[in-house]
Image (cartoon, rainbow, N blue to C red):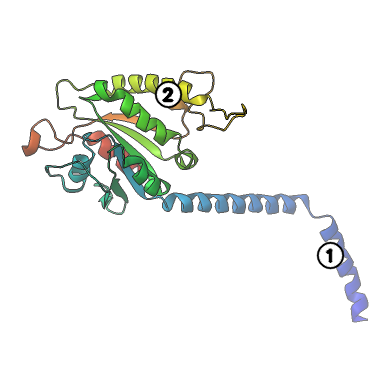
Amino acid sequence: AMAGGLEPHLEALRRELRAPDPAVLSVLLALLAVAITLLIWRFVQGRRSSRQAVLLLGLCDAGKTLLFARLLTGKYRDTQTSITDSSAVYRVSNDKSANVTLIDLPGHESLRLQFLERFKAAARAIVFVVDSVAFQREVKDVAEFLYQVLVDSTVLKNAPALLIACNKQDVTMAKSAKLIQHQLEKELNTLRVTRSAAPTSLDGSATGGPPQLGKKGKDFDFSQLPMKVEFVECSARGSKGEEGDADFEGLEKWLAKIA
């Protein structure tokens, strides 16, 4: 008798399951969408939090090591060409809980790609330091190194924020950030054209080449890259030399933004 009394209710439940209320279904779908969004967000945040390094790159004598020292201590110190990496935790001045690991990498031609290979996967951001005084003489070497960084598969995949720090602005002959950007875009465009043709083997088949830099069919500019690129003018030495402070407010603001 009890089973017979429950049967109508069970049948009603079966009908509800076969044809759910559209309103209930909408709520369930909305909850599912929120759950998926949260999972994706946590995954992206997890990958980002695992990349805490800011790499200081550039040619020899660009001023990377002095910038590194000034950011950490505020003090001037004599430096020499680095043959290994140096790293330290940099805390953002206006937020003691925000910090990144600064890593100063050697700029010597025989070492720089080797050290980039070692640390590139951990890079949240890259500061590419340019000697604004020697730039006109070194533009081809600067562009060559920057090109190698920008076509690296790991860098392209992770797309770390990129800052071109135009250093030594305390010197009268220093080139402006605007001119440096314009010249680098021209040189990178030339490199892209000369490197884009894949080499061929003896039988005439293509052997592959580096990834395409920028947009095919258009002259290269930095806005075409997957990462955000900014330029700042700075001086690790400062206008008053060893006795004064460094002039890199733009660099500090950028570090605070990406930390």
Inspect this view and state whether residue 137 appears: yes
Locate residue 115, reporting x and y percent: 34, 46
How far apart are labels 2 and 1 at the CA level? 70 Å
Inspect this view and state whether residue 228 appears: no
At label 2, which amino acid type do we have? Answer: Leu
Query: In front of the other: label 2 or label 1?
Result: 2
Q: Is residue 34 left or right of residue 221?
A: right
Front residue of this view, candidates 152 and 204: 204
- Residue that extends furthest to the front in the rendered view of this protein: 202
At label 1, which amino acid type do we have? Answer: Leu
Q: Find residue 18 and report its image quarter.
A: bottom right
Residue shown at 77%/50% (left/top)?
A: 22
Front residue of this view, candidates 249 and 82: 82
Q: Residue 13 carries which label?
A: 1
Q: Mark 2 points at which residue?
A: 191
In the rendered structure, which disc, 2 or 1, sits on the residue that comes first in sequence? 1
Helix or strand or loop: what does disc 2 sit on? helix
Locate residue 187, reporting x and y percent: 38, 21
What is the crowding at mark 2: few (fewer than 14 residues within 10 Å), some, or many (at least 20)?
some
Residue shown at 42%/20% (left/top)?
A: 190
Front residue of this view, candidates 85 and 256: 85
Helix or strand or loop: what does disc 1 sit on? helix
Locate residue 165, reporting x and y percent: 28, 32
